[in-house]
Image (cartoon, rainbow, N blue to C red):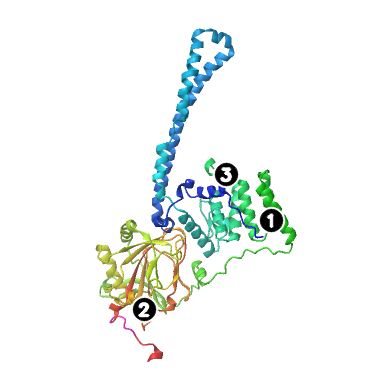
Amino acid sequence: MALEIVHLPSWKLVFVATVLLRALVDGQSADNEQSHSTSVAGMEQLLRVEKELIDNLNSYADELEQKLNVVRSFVSQMRMENDKALDDPIQYLSHPLNAYSLIRRMHQDWTHWQHYMKQPVGEQQVSYVQQRREQLPSSTDLEEAGDALHRILVTYDLNVSDMARGLLNGKKYNVSLNGLDSYALGMYYYDQQKFGYACQWIFQTIEWLQGPHKLPLPLELDRAEVFHVYAEALIKMNRYKDALQVLHTAATLKKDNLKLLLRKSEVEMLIRTQPNVVPTKFITPQAQAYERGCRGLYPRHSKLHCVYNSTNSAFLRLAPLKMELISLDPYMVLYHDVIAPSEISELQSLAVPGLKRATVFNQKSMSNQVVRTRTSKVTWLLDTLNQLTIRLNRRITDMTGFDMYGSEMLQVMNYGLGGHYDKHFDYFNSSVATDLTRLNGDRIATVLFYLTDVEQGGATVFPNIEKAIFPKSGTAVVWYNLKHDGNGDPQTLHAACPVIVGSKWVCNKWIRERQQVFRRPCLATSKNV
């Protein structure tokens, strides 16, 4: 008979507690999903909401303290009178004033105290938290955050223990995950059936609980249940003997728990009946070209060079641009110091109010869809929105020599927790997406401005040609997506690597081909000549 983990109710309470204020995140519909983790700029609002909730909780504590002070002050007075009476009850009660006062107190005062004790405390603060409920991350947000940490872990071949302690890609940060964080990640991996990772994260929880740390009562983890979950993950890895030891520890913590004792006997039976079972090995994924590029492992040797581009337009004769030649096939160049800090700041200010979850065009459904392979938020800016957007489009013309008429709007993007964009092509494939290319043609070229430095991660990699561009504020990479015959160039397959640490802002422009007919005419391939 298959043995499945039993999800105890208190597990769920603890799991939800790691999101925010426990059950407050339940019940949010998909329609209200805000994709909090997909943009650093978007998550700033969460910090402001958290501050307001903390202030609200502090107000709740003040009310409790005020009531507590009232009670304690009168307890002191009442105890003093009662102690005096108990020293010599006969003498005390023989006095008519004492006797009357006792009768009066017992009849009136304790009725008032009963009413006072029943009075609710903090109703206003509880209502405030309820009002903020829609602004709190949902279970989907929490799952996406787990996806993001896993993406960072796997892409950069990090160690779970190091990550939990704030050691990311060889650099130590003054931040770490607490027991609730690591336990939530363990449960996330368990639900994803990635039991090797589940074991590692739950073990981090156990180590954290064995330290000097203390959780507030509403968020307390039941140690026995943590051990129970750890044992279940070990069982899924066919590590029965290890699971038995862990269950023994759990049963020691809860000696009368029949469920643990039964599970322990079931595992003992597994050991006897399956003595030759082979434990499942934990295997880390083999690094492919994409991962090697993200890790900065592509060959760095190049015979290409840097020049001052003064030929693309008449303006560049007066103000040439610093250009680095990256590749000839496909054509790819990197411009340096091509956008000013003041322009970057203005772009970000324009973008923040309109940031929305980025989508990907699905050719089958002919619609844009939110997908897990692209995690960022975007804003589209009209070319004629203001002087800045007009100026940037002119500059792109100078950089590329192309006409911007009929091309797509400027797109400003901000990446969030582990923000990335999986391997993809920018061109549509005109033979399939005819509705998208009929008017202005396919995307002949891409211009990608880097608006911020990124402390770790976030490179743009081209795995087929083993080229990687790491974000540097003020630079812009330009490449051709189409061959001379107008067909898509598979060498332009590219991806945005997960951001490890930092806020990655970019601005891109997709240039359409129709208006370039005399600037880059289509040429026949040699086999068709």
Q: How far apart are marks 1 and 2 (CA)?
A: 57 Å
Q: Quadrant of the image for the N terminus?
A: bottom right
Q: Nearer the viewer, mark 2 or mark 3?
A: 2
How many numbered discs, if any?
A: 3
Q: Nearer the viewer, mark 1 or mark 3?
A: 1
Residue at which label 1 appears: 242
Q: Quadrant of the image for the C terminus?
A: bottom left
76 lies above or below 336 = above
Residue 468's image quarter?
bottom left
At label 2, which amino acid type do we have? Ser
Residue at which label 3 appears: 213
Element class at badge 2: loop
47 lies above or below 360 = above
Q: Position of residue 28 (x, y in %)?
A: 43, 52
Q: Which residue is drawn at 45% across and 27% down?
A: 116
Q: Which residue is farthest front?
A: 1
400 drawn magenta = no
At label 1, which amino acid type do we have? Asp
Callout 2 crowding tier (Cα within 10 Å): few <14, some 14–19, many ≥20: some
Residue 178 in sight here: no
**Could you tell whether 185 is left or right of 141 in the image?**
right
At label 3, which amino acid type do we have? His
521 drawn magenta = yes
Residues 100 and 485: in front is 100
Residue at which label 2 appears: 430
Residues 257 and 474: in front is 257
Residue 162 in sight here: yes
Which range is magenta?
518-522
Q: Residue at x 67, y 52 (%)?
A: 263
Q: Distance between the residues labelled 1 and 3?
A: 26 Å
Element class at badge 1: helix
- Which of the marked residues, 1 or 3, is nearer the chain's N terminus? 3
